[in-house]
Amino acid sequence: MHPAIAKGADAADTGSTAFSTIATIDLDAIVSNYRFLAATAPTAQTAAVLKADAYGLGLAPVARALLDAGCTCFFVAQFSEAAALRAVAPSAKIYVLNGIAGGPVRDFANLRLRPVLNSLSDIARWRMASAPRPGAILNVDTGMNRLGLSAADVALLQSEPERLEGVELDFLMSHLACADQPEHPMNAAQLCRFQSLREAFAHLPATLSNTAGCLLDAAYHFDLTRVGIGLFGGNPRLEGENPFRNVLTLETPILQLREIDSAECVGYGATYQATTPRRIAITGLGYADGCLRALGNFAKGWIAGHDIRMVGQVSMDLTAFDVTGIPAEVCREGSMIELIGPNAPIDRLARSANTISYEILTRLGNRIARNYISSRC
């Protein structure tokens, strides 16, 4: 069956995509990655983390694909994201990682949104919400020192159990700081602290692992895993082979081709100077679209079987590539250069900017046309 191709119906229609940068998102690949992650932790439920507009790829279409694949539990960061997801997933369990700070408590209850309780004050505010309240998650810090109750807070809850009276808890949660480095001693240290803190809530199911944690051994899996970057094709580990299917293909059109002589420069600041005559392709992608300025002079793209180098600084709306030697019949105005995709891995691009695939994905701008492909239609 040929994949169905659809323009993103949940984004504003910007008209024709001719000579536009296009993000093609493979929903089948997202589902495949979800099933792979579920198989790595077969004794745990697998929840999908769709914060930041499903890592920049579109909350509604991604959520629908995962719902169709049987996913019933989701995590987002903020109340506004949860409210948008509730409209797409009326029956799903939706947890809000940043807790109840981002929205009125009554709205959480009215929309059946489940907060992650990150502090004693969160617990107190949640208790004040009008019943019936959905279940919540209790987050404990095990060494990352972001959100979560301290060991002293947990001890206080043990000595004053009335602080949790009337609060239905679904899970005890913590988050791994260094799971992207499997041999890092922080992993074992956090696991030990989490197991110790669990003694105070022995009746509660537990959740610790993100995507990278799923790839650690079964001791880290507990009852629920929370998978994000792996769904979208990014490698959760700093080193090693990426086990996930490519999801995103980002292509940008050549707007103009220029022949420059040796000693001529390209772009702001004249940071690239040719040493021999070169052929330069100017493309319609810039930092306003999420193409990081740090990529200038370092990143590689791909066209017609050839890796090509980005030259000069990234401008707001334009980026240049050296296409010297690429046959003219496959490299002309309107030809598309692949910046991310099966021939240009996202993690390679991220390394060129000294960053991670998470940042590359979540910076994709709203001028980029998002097209979705799936064999389900």
Image (spheres, helix red, strand yellow):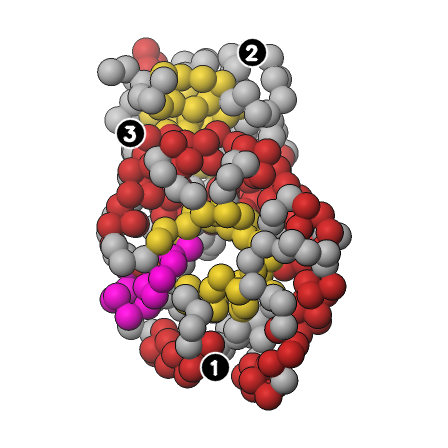
Q: 300 or 4, which lies in front?
A: 4
**Up/down of 264 relative to 72, above or below:** above
Residues at marks 3 and 1, CA–CA distance in whole angstroms: 58 Å
Nearest-to-viewer mark from 3 and 1: 1
Frontmost residue, 102 versus 289: 102
Residue 306 at x, y percent in the picture: 29, 29
Against 283, residue 359 (above or below) is: below
Q: Earlier in the sequence, mark 3 or mark 1?
A: 1
* Nearest to N terminus: mark 2 or mark 3: 2
Q: Magenta stretch: residue 224 in it?
A: yes
Which corner quadrant holds the C terminus? top left
- Label 3: which residue? 306
Q: Nearer the viewer, residue 131 or 30?
A: 131
Read off the magenta span.
215-226
Mark pair 2, 3: CA separation: 28 Å
Instruction: Give the residue number, with chain letter if any, for mark 1.
Output: 200
